[in-house]
Amino acid sequence: MPNDAHAARIEIRFPGTHAGFAQGFLEARQALDAHGLAGGPRYNAELVFEEITANIVCHGSPDGHALEVWFTLEDCGDAIVLTFEDNGVPFDPRTRPDPPRQKSLEEARIGGYGLMLVRHAATSIDYLRTAAGRNRTTVRLPHP
Amino acid sequence: MQLQLADAGDGVLNVLLVGRLDTPGVDRIETSLTAQLVPRAARAMIDLSQVTFIGSGGIRMFITIARSLVRKGGKLVLYGAQPLVAQVFETTSLNDIVPVRADASAAAQAVRG
């Protein structure tokens, strides 16, 4: 993002469905294009969006209630901060361990790599269950 | 997300993927790619040079297809990944269990080996 855009803030709200995810991801990428975040930091911002949002959509509503996702991205000058809020079941992403290093194709786990990728990209991950009953996950990425 | 198949000779298939292997992209091609490769126990090399993004859904897809192929006597080799995509392979250690090569020549050698 440009140096004069440290206060840059992106806000997107979308339904927690596969179609809503695709539309939200498209809007997020268009907003990132407009702000000029590029290269590795851009890739990591998209990776975090992909993995956190996919978890919400796939696991957030086992009872079938309508999910909503509120996403913000802020350039704080010393970090890129991505915040996700959703009205799904409580889920603290910090509690899930990384899958073990893969020893063979036959024994490899099929899933569990999303949060591993988020942890690898992030400098910190915070979680809060808000008073309004939402998950709030905040991921800080190194500033480019 | 698009895929194109071509005969690379000696019964090897070359698969060109173009686009993003994010969740929507994987949703778009996974069934078709699996159907093209697994039933025939293909020896396949997948060209990733035009894949600009991969997330965990793409990793899961490659593990699933590679495992199915190996069980049936086939083989999957990935090649040409852009640096940021290759970094995801390293983070998830995909390249420890699925052959990942720099270019088509190395991939052709690995898939026939």
Image (tube, coloured by chain):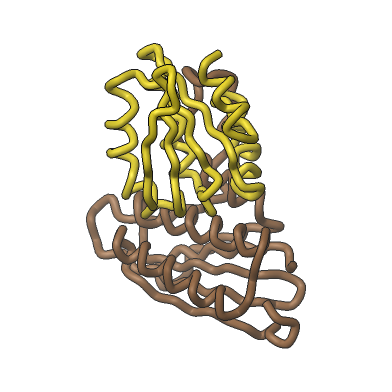
Chain colours: A brown, B yellow
Relative to B111, B3 lies left or right: left
Where is A25 relative to A13, above or below?
Answer: above
* Figure quadrant of the N terminus of chain A: bottom right
Q: Residue B81: percent from the left, percent from the top? A: 59, 42
Q: Residue A71: percent from the left, percent from the top? A: 48, 71
Where is B35 relative to A16, above or below?
Answer: above
User: A88 or A116, which lies in front?
Assistant: A116
Residue at 34%, 27% in the rendered image: B37
Residue at 67%, 58% in the rendered image: A40
Q: Residue B77: percent from the left, percent from the top? A: 52, 27
Residue at 41%, 66% in the rendered image: A86
Relative to B25, A44 lies left or right: right
* Figure quadrant of the C terminus of chain A: bottom right
Where is A97 relative to B26, above or below?
Answer: above
Q: Residue B15: percent from the left, percent from the top? A: 42, 36
In the rendered image, which quarter is residue A34 located in? bottom right
In the rendered image, which quarter is residue B79 located in? top right
User: B56 or B106, which lies in front?
Assistant: B106
